Image: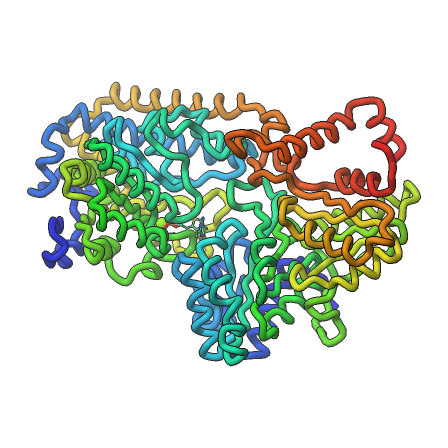
Amino acid sequence: MLTIRPSTDTSTRRDRLSRLIAPDGERLHDPDLDPWVADVFEEQLLALYEDMVVSRRIDTEATALQRQGQLVLWPPLIGQEAAQVGSARALRKDDFVFSSYRENAVAYVRGVSMTDMIRVWRGSQFSGWNPYDVGMATPTVIIGAQTLHAVGYAMGITRDGDDAAAVAYFGDGATSEGDTNEAMVFAAAYDAPVVFFCQNNQYAISEPVGLQAQRPIADRSPGFGIPSLRVDGNDVLAVLAATRMALDHARTGDGPMFIEAVTYRMGPHTTSDDPTRYRDKAEEQRWRELDPLERTRRLLMAEGALTDERQASVSARADAVAKELRDGCLALRPHEPLSIFDEVYADTPPSLRRERDEYAAYLASFDDADGANREAAR
Amino acid sequence: MTELTLAKAITTGLADALEADDRVVLLGEDIGKLGGVFRVTDGLQERFGIDRVVDTPLAEAGIIGTAVGLAYRGFRPVCELQFDGFVFPGFDQVVTQVAKMRYRTQGAVKMPITIRVPFGGGIGSVEHHSESPEAYFAHTPGLRVVACSSPQDAYSMIRQAVESDDPVVFFEPKRRYWSKGEVVTDVSAVPSLDRARVVVPGTDVTLVTYGPLVQTAVDAALAAEDDGVSIEVIDLRSLAPLDEDAIVDSVQKTGRIVIAHEAARFGGIGAEIAAMVTERCFDRLTAPPLRVTGHDIPYPPSELEDHYLPDLDRMLDGVDRVMGVRV
Ligand SMILES: Cc1ncc(C[n+]2csc(CCOP(=O)(O)OP(=O)(O)O)c2C)c(N)n1
Ligand SMILES: [Mg+2]
């Protein structure tokens, strides 16, 4: 399952999915992963479960807001809660995340407020939060670009003699982009303390993963000199263990590591997408049976940890977060028009100041008497 | 003659091109089963097969770079780049390989590649989905850069682009994809790909634009008529090379020119036209050429995009200025 040295042939082991929770909720054992979650007992597992329930609730609420015309777009993460929550809960505060647009559960775990999370999707700002406040960069829409940023950040960590790590989140589709492959070359060249966390959700919009990779995605990084793990991305415990292992690898000077979290995008690519054009109900149903929340719930139930009372408090928390999201979204007011000229440069150059002033005068012409006359004359 | 949306006119043009020449192949992300995110290639894979309408891995350099190889081998690739903001991973292949291949090989190797790019704003989307990168391409000798604005042109121009032995970067005004118009599929009588077109004849001001703003300019001409100002609207169609004579002819008549585009002003198509007109029509000009464009800022978040995009009022404001109306 784990190639510590790329020369070790472990391809058959990478074909196998590492797992700690079976789809039916049975707690499985894996000698490589178990030690990394030895401190996870009922209470910790309940917390992970709660994070996942909240994440799904965020997703449903945002999707509803988009349908109601309050958001311009939303990229659902439903189905990927375990991959996102499990990995993000492995991180330290001083680690730094570079993600794509879909990692809203990661953002939630990093402490991004609901209002800040929604700004981008309301079309109100390009960056909903200050990256330094939460240790997570602004979501990157250009596929694969952020993987290089994570490597560069990790190179900086090494130079500073720090033991933090950078994490690059990206999709299966992103593994085809040049940037992602260059990121692996650089990471390996400099032993950068970076974790490549690929959520293989089986699709890049309509394209099945088989178009991007003829072998398991986890097979690719060893060729670059980066050991990899292939983990059941719908198993929150296995994802947590794998990410902790990879982070430890990075922190202790062993360089980059690659995790393929095998999961499924249960929803559309975004609220603009129509998956019925490219995949069938039977496939969706097969994956529904592997639902990351359900299997955790089953395990917790089997262990008697998820009492009715606890389930109620989890739901209450999810509702509260959803309310924060909705209220935060609806309270957002458009920015002042001339703000579009801000922060283009450290100091606005005279030419741009002039452009802004001209536009301000133009806008004002609609208000004053002259403007009104002009409009009337028209 | 059939009524088609601009998007469907391109679909029809692509289908007819695939039908006419079996060396035509379509390459792009999600263009097969999904029919493209704008459904422009809808139904084409079903009709022509997966070898001719090819879903590619998610890599723009890959799409353009393999198109170069296919062109070397005698194919006519038509590449779709999903959105204007996603052209850049493929940009290197376009400017260093596609554009220069004929020149590099003294004409031995041609690059009949069409690169389709939905472009422009006004659709209320997220970052990188509303951009106008045409000037980057127009600055590169060897590329033909065109923008269609009507269903008829969409059909005719995509046919001509695919048939062209030069590489063509084909900009599609995405916010006009759903506008309808009559389309004839006989392209023998239509203007060639490098010609501009007078959309509305006029005598006082020449208003030059392309792509999504052509409709806005036509509306502006109509509105100005009420003020007694006669605007001649020119749809450039070809941004590079430029149909200089069409613009000069018009300015010789009007003596005034306004150029409008969504792209930022600095180093844009408007700057090139203003300079050219100044050089060629200096004596005839009764007002300095004027540009009505996007501001010199990144395309803003969608809630404020209306403050970025030139609209009817900003065009008329520009017209007022060259007419000497104090505002
Ligand atoms: C450079 C670039 N090309 C194309 C796109 C359009 N696009 C947006 S998401 C996407 C699919 C991404 O798939 P994947 O990497 O698997 O991530 P997922 O959406 O499944 O999370 C594509 C093609 C883009 N955003 N950037
Ligand atoms: Mg994917």
Decide if residue B219 is on the left or right side of residue A286: right
Q: Residue at x 26, y 45 (%)?
A: A196
x and y, in percent, of residue A242 in the image: 18, 40
x and y, in percent, of residue A124 in the image: 54, 31
Please name whichever residue, A302 or A287, is drawn nearer the observer in this view of the structure: A287
Q: In the rendered view, would you say A30 is above or below A363?
A: below
Please name whichever residue, B209 or B288, is drawn nearer the observer in this view of the structure: B288
Q: Residue at x 40, y 58 (%)?
A: B59
Q: How many labels sit on residues?
A: 0
| The N terminus of chain B, quarter of image | bottom right
x and y, in percent, of residue A206 in the image: 42, 55
Decide if residue B112 is on the left or right side of residue A351: left
- Colour basis: rainbow
Outermost residue toward the left?
A31
Q: In the rendered view, would you say B291 is above or below B29?
A: above
Decide if residue B103 is on the left or right side of residue A47: right
Picture quadrant of residue A324: top left
Residue B32 visible in this rendered orientation of the protein: no
Decide if residue A49 is on the left or right side of residue B47: left
x and y, in percent, of residue B11 in the image: 60, 64
Q: In the rendered view, would you say A366 is above or below B109?
A: above
Q: Residue at x 21, y 31 (%)?
A: A162
| The C terminus of chain B, quarter of image | top right
Outermost residue toward the right?
B228
Picture quadrant of residue A235: top left
